[in-house]
């Protein structure tokens, strides 16, 4: 379900293992649909499309969290679906997600639900300044407004059309990390190494593995929390949990994604088992083996802005791939999207090397060639 780049990389992993693949997506030129054996070109709630997908499939997964849960319920009545509709529904709703963190004993930011004027008025002063986030359909920095005081909070809620929201206290961040965890129907749990992430304008820009600034104890805590959340959800599939590390060293969970994640893309080139192969294994009931990182890695996200170095109104320019690919250990992944536009995820670049310092050095050279900021 879903034809974006995550589906495309899942399809590649499944095909490498000998599986036939089908993708349901309403875009006739979707990146995953272009490489799958079958493309069901319908909407996600189209009854005939869902019937076609079930006819073609022995098991079904999803590549993004906003697939309607109702479609997963329909599919799950007839085929194994991983992750299941209930788990995806929790990840679709920030308020439900926060409630899960609390139930599972995983620390998270102080927060409050806001669905009514009364709840808006009852927000404690301790949550301000904060970040107001829509409970649903927010990702890559969308559906979020920073608020300094009660007047700004009320204005922001109005700006967001008074939809259900979660207000989180603004916390002093030191760094951001993530954990990709895979859990099977037999309660096997394996994880990729902890990943350190840098975001720009709410969108992931750089991932480094091993995480250079996270202590072993902190990494173990994050791994334990991710496994606890997967089990608390009864989750089957690949789940990414994003964490904030505060300036005082505390770890707090930020959010979850019920799918492979941008920060795990390095595993295609830097690990003996990628996050997409883990997704195939969880879906097909194959054994889960702990991934082994064989090369320190740095991943650079490639947005459509690279094609418009003179600005969005200027002519499109092909980035200097030949110069970038002349660097050692560089792996280019473009997602087959028909057109570039600013902010659109067009691909990623992974640099692997014998040492973390060398991987970072080459990644900085690649970033300079592409006109990306240093990190």
Image (cartoon, rainbow, N blue to C red):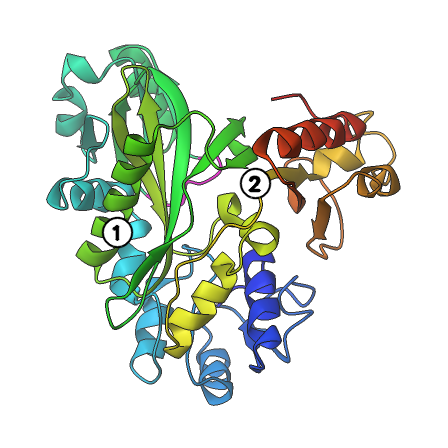
Picture coordinates of residue 252 (x, y %)?
A: 26, 30
Report which quarter residue 105 is drawn in. top left
N-term mark: 2 or 1:
1
Picture coordinates of residue 11 (x, y %)?
A: 58, 69
Report which quarter residue 207 is drawn in. top right
Question: Circle 2: is it few (<14), some (14-19), or many (20+) Cα within 10 Å?
Answer: many
Secondary structure under the numbered disc 2 in the rendered image = loop
Q: Residue at x 68, y 27 (%)?
A: 361
Secondary structure under the numbered disc 1 in the rendered image = helix
Can residue 137 be found in the magenta stretch? yes
Does residue 133 appear in this view?
yes
Left or right for 216, reference 323: left
Picture coordinates of residue 56 (x, y %)?
A: 51, 87
Report which quarter residue 301 is drawn in. top right
Please tell me which residue lies in front, 259 or 137: 259
Relative to 22, does residue 314 appear above or below in the rendering? above
Can residue 54 be found in the magenta stretch? no
Left or right for 199, reference 227: right
Q: Which residues are magenta?
A: 136-142
* Residue sitting farthest toward the bottom: 55
Give the CA distance from mark 2 to mark 1.
23 Å
- Which residue in the protein does label 2 denote? 296
Please tell me which residue lies in front, 260 or 208: 208
- Which residue in the protein does label 1 denote? 227
Question: Circle 1: is it few (<14), some (14-19), or many (20+) Cα within 10 Å?
Answer: many
- Main secondary structure of the magenta stretch: loop
Q: Residue at x 25, y 72 (%)?
A: 186
Q: Name the quarter where the C terminus is drawn.
A: top right
Of the numbered discs in the image, which one, if any, rests on residue 152? none
Relative to 19, does residue 132 appear above or below in the rendering? above
For the residues carrying marks 2 and 1, which lies nearer the camera in this image?
A: 2
Does residue 134 appear in this view?
no
């Amino acid at each position: 379900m879903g034809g974006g780049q995550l589906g495309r990389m899942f399809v590649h992993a499944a095909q490498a293992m000998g599986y036939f693949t089908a993708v349901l997506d309403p875009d006739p030129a979707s990146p995953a649909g272009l490489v799958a054996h079958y493309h069901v070109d319908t909407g996600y709630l189209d009854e005939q499309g869902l019937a076609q997908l079930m006819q073609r499939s022995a098991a079904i997964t999803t590549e993004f969290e906003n697939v309607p849960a109702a479609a997963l319920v329909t599919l799950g009545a007839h085929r194994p679906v991983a992750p299941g509709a209930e788990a995806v529904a929790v990840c679709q709703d920030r308020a439900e997600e926060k409630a899960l963190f609390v139930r599972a004993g995983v620390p998270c930011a102080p927060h409050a639900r806001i669905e009514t004027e009364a709840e808006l008025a009852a927000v404690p002063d301790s949550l301000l300044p904060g970040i107001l986030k829509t409970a649903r359909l927010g990702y890559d920095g969308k559906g979020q407004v920073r608020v300094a005081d009660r007047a700004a909070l009320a204005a922001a809620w109005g700006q967001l059309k008074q939809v259900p929201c979660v207000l989180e206290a603004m916390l002093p961040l030191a760094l951001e990390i993530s954990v990709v965890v895979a859990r099977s129907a037999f309660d096997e749990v394996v994880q990729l190494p902890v990943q350190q992430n840098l975001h720009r304008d709410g969108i992931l820009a750089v991932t480094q593995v091993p995480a250079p600034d996270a202590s072993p104890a902190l990494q173990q805590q994050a791994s334990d929390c991710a496994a606890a959340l997967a089990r608390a959800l009864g989750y089957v599939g690949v789940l990414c949990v994003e964490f904030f590390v505060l300036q005082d060293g505390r770890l707090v969970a930020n959010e979850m994604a019920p799918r492979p994640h941008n920060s795990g893309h390095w595993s295609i080139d830097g690990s003996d088992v990628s996050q997409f192969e883990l997704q195939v294994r969880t879906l097909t009931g194959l054994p889960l083996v702990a991934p082994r990182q064989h090369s320190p890695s740095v991943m650079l996200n490639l947005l459509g802005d690279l094609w418009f170095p003179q600005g969005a109104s200027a002519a499109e320019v092909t980035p200097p791939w030949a110069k970038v690919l002349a660097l050692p250990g560089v792996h280019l992944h473009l997602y087959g999207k028909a057109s570039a536009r600013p902010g659109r995820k067009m691909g990623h670049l992974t640099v692997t090397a014998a040492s973390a310092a060398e991987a970072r050095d080459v990644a900085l050279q690649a970033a300079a060639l592409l006109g990306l900021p240093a990190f």
